[in-house]
Amino acid sequence: MDAFELAIAPELRPRVRVGWVSMHRLGEPLRGELDALVAAEIGRMRTADKGRTAGQIERLGPARSLYRALGLDPTRHRPSPEALLRRVLRGDPFPRVHPAVDLANL
């Protein structure tokens, strides 16, 4: 893998944390297990967050704060975790992309 450099603006450093996840062999053999995990997590979210607004869901706070720090209004430009959760709470299907992406989205 080629090396790359990541720079974070000084004013964002107190709020931004960077992580790296490397996943291997996440193809079809895990599909059944992943389907069960996704279904269970969606059920848990629908139960835990039913009737709550995005502003009332504590785990969405950091993404909303980061958007504000970047000068974006999180109610106009939804952070992806919030958009996904809103979709789940509406009863819409959870978007499935690739096993690695699906795991990160949960």
Image (tube, rainbow, N blue to C red):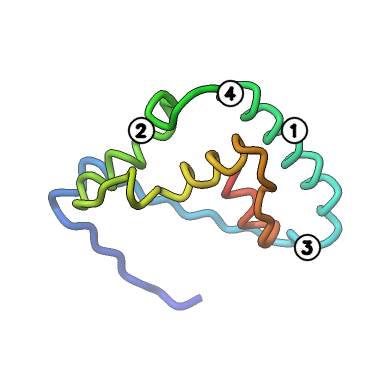
Which residue does the numbered mark 4 point to in the structure image? 50
Q: Is 39 placed left or right of 90 in the picture?
A: right
Going from N to C along the chain, the mark reached first, 3 or 1, is 3
Note whether 106 is above or below 50 in the view shown.
below
Mark 1–mark 4 Cα distance, whole angstroms, equals 15 Å
- Dot 2: few (<14), some (14–19), or many (≥20) neighbours within 10 Å? some
Q: Secondary structure at mark 1?
A: helix
Spatial distance from mark 3 to mark 4, Cα to Cα? 32 Å
In this view, the residue in front, 35 or 7, is 35
Look at the picture and state if 52 lies above or below 25. above
Mark 2 or mark 3, which is nearer to you? 2
For label 2, the residue is 61
Sequence-first disc among 1 and 2:
1
What residue does disc 1 label? 40
What residue is shown with label 3? 27
Q: Residue at x 61, y 57 (%)?
A: 101
Kind of residue indicated by mark 1 = Ala
Which three-letter amino acid code belongs to the residue tagged 4? Lys
